[in-house]
Amino acid sequence: MGNTVYIISGPAGVGKSTTSQILVQAISKSAYISGDDVSHIPVNGRGKPWLDKDTYDLTWTNILSLTNNTLDYRYDVVIDYIAFPKEVKWLAQALSGKGARIVYVVLLVDKKTIAYRDRLRSEEAWMGERSLELLEQFENDPELSDRFKLYTDQYQTDQLSMIVEEIMSCDKYIFNA
Amino acid sequence: MGNTVYIISGPAGVGKSTTSQILVQAISKSAYISGDDVSHIPVNGRGKPWLDKDTYDLTWTNILSLTNNTLDYRYDVVIDYIAFPKEVKWLAQALSGKGARIVYVVLLVDKKTIAYRDRLRSEEAWMGERSLELLEQFENDPELSDRFKLYTDQYQTDQLSMIVEEIMSCDKYIFNA
């Protein structure tokens, strides 16, 4: 088997970035792609990825290119971004020639926790309604199989390594099994 | 004529990032690619781009992919990275099908200024000897034509928009003229 591409998804405020960072550090040859950073490469004249089709397409095309190139150099890749099954399917299809394992995890928490964590961010970074909308979108996505969902409510911050261990060892998260 | 790719180069401490940011803001449809950020996509198991061939190759391959994709969406692209004529030639060659104008600017300052500016950074970001080495490497590169060099010693921080204006309007910086 070749390398692994981890897609750490979920609504804003579930701990995607923190979880991704710990995962990246747990792998001996690893790369980290922040979907948010990639979506900010266009500066003037771009839209919000979830509202503007061109910005959305360019963001995913860039994520795909970076993943492709990085796999060529035999890194495991951790993608930290809001990704629905539709996008993961597209990515898996586009990477199918690479022989890479695609691991897909949707981190979720209950509504109260997500609203609370959002308020802990700096004011400019508040997602507000958007966080709750995304949570509902994930929970109601008919294409999202339960096996990819990982509820993190019961974990404390110092238990994040347990989540990472589960992500790395649990076969149910393999998208292209 | 198609879009423009600006490569803002020079040793650490010459103001590449600040100049690039102002340039990006001066263009109505613009994208910003930080070579440093791209070089940090591999996390564990990478070398320093200037010492490790694989890390170097992956960084430039990623910069090329991002530039290619972003040009497809009709953005002007600003690349902020230490780039020598060798790399610019390679990039221009790889992008030759796009009909894009490649603008190449090597920002330079005298040795004293570069050492002084380096000390203004936070300690973790000090480049030290490496800054001066790079300055010498640029000044002694036989492939680097004088027309791409832009000495910024005489400019004050509040005059950066004059540098940007010169970069945008002066034909001598066009690499593939």
Image (spheres, coloured by chain):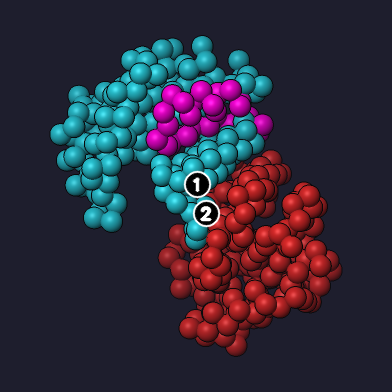
Chain colours: A cyan, B red
Give, as a single range, the part of the protein colored magenta. A72-95
**Quadrant of res B80:** bottom right
**Quadrant of res A117:** top left
Task: Tell me the element at label 1.
Answer: helix
Seen at 26% across and 29% down, the residue is: A136
Residue A72 place in picture, x, y as percent? 66, 31
Q: Nearer the viewer, residue B148 or A127?
A: A127
User: Which numbered tag is attached to residue A42?
Assistant: 2
User: Which numbered tag is attached to residue A55?
Assistant: 1
> What is the C-alpha distance between the residues marked 2 and 1?
8 Å
Residue A18 place in picture, x, y as percent? 35, 38
| Cβ–Cβ under 8 Å for marks 2 and 1 | yes
Q: Mark 1: few, some, or many residues within 10 Å (few <14, many ≥20)?
A: many
The amino acid on which the numbered mark 1 sits, given as a three-letter code, is: Thr
Seen at 36% across and 26% down, the residue is: A106
Residue A8 place in picture, x, y as percent? 41, 30
Task: Tell me the element at label 2.
Answer: strand
